[in-house]
Amino acid sequence: MLLKDKIAVVTGAGNGIGKSIADLFLENGAKVVGLDIVDCASDNPDLTMLKVNVSDFNDCQRVVEEIFKLYDHVDVLVNCAGITRDAMTKKMTEEQFDQVISVNLKGVWNLTKMIGPAMQERGYGSIISISSVVGIYGNIGQSNYAATKAGVIGMTKSWAKEFARKGENVRVNAVAPGYTMTNMMKTVPEDLLNKFKGLTMLGRLAEPIEIANAVLFLASDMSSYITGEVLNVNGGMRL
Ligand SMILES: NC(=O)c1ccc[n+]([C@@H]2O[C@H](COP(=O)([O-])OP(=O)(O)OC[C@H]3O[C@@H](n4cnc5c(N)ncnc54)[C@H](O)[C@@H]3O)[C@@H](O)[C@H]2O)c1
């Protein structure tokens, strides 16, 4: 019960890694508000699912107001919602570039801007944003995605300084997963998935729960002296 009675907000909680994080947080005693762009129902009284487009500033303001009506504070924010729109840069459209920036980068900024200062005021909080192995090593056909995932690391390090600058116990970290078996991987051809497996020391892709476990560690007081860090969870992958 590492998050007993903690209030956690998880974006992208409808599917994949975000869903796994929300489920694991619930198992560990948290009350979770899951945010997603698709409608998601919940029959668990400790899980409230709300619909929002994280890239839309006004929509985020609306949903954050709703969260603060449900709970008077937030202990943990996980920025997990993300998309890919892959193409070689020569063929990538401006729309593909802008879409990925607006969800993966601006979406993370929107929620953190609206929840981080409240944590700072209260003097307690943990913010975890999901970066990627691609934000560290880059990848062919993912210049837009790599920019956002490297950007998440830059924002994480800035916020770690900003939100604790007067000694507040607000920690800000990123998790950089390797390739993980979710819907996001469905468009990746089998031969490429096998190549990615071969690039890891463990010889396999990650399961969502393996990423969620790392996020739980950073969310909980188990990591009380860790901030401004990027935790690589990639099976020893080198791209
Ligand atoms: N799967 C991987 O291999 C992998 C590797 C490294 C990092 N990541 C990152 O992990 C995170 C989760 O990815 P995943 O694999 O679980 O993907 P996924 O597609 O399974 O889940 C993403 C979730 O985000 C939601 N979402 C998308 N756009 C949104 C928006 N504008 N507003 C609110 N919600 C939105 C989707 O509806 C979905 O439920 C992403 O940030 C992704 O970039 C994934």
Image: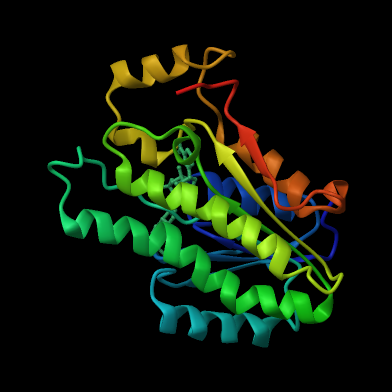
Picture colour scheme: rainbow
Q: Quadrant of the C terminus?
A: top left
Pick whichever, 5 or 144, lies toward us.
144
Q: In which quarter of the image is residue 171?
A: bottom right
- Residue 215's place in the image compared with 98, above or below, is above
Location of residue 122 by image quarter = bottom right
Residue that appears at 62% across and 80% down: 67
User: Between residues 128 and 160, which one lies in front from this camera angle?
Assistant: 160
Task: Name the residue located 40 percent from the left edge and 65 percent from the top edge.
Answer: 37
Vertical side of 73 occupied by 91: above or below: above
Is residue 174 something one can see in this rendering? yes
Count of numbered marks: 0
Residue 141 % position (x, y): 26, 36
- Could you tell whether 41 is left or right of 140 in the image? right
Please tell me which residue is depicted at 51% across the width and 68% down the height of the picture.
Answer: 109
Q: Which residue lies furthest to the left in this view?
A: 91
Residue toward you, 215 or 169:
169
- Left or right of 4? Residue 145 is left
In the image, residue 127 lies at what x, y percent? 68, 60
Is any part of residue 44 visible from this angle?
no
Question: x, y percentage for residue 142?
Answer: 31, 40
User: Can you give x and y, in whole percent of width and height, for residue 167 in the image?
Assistant: 87, 70
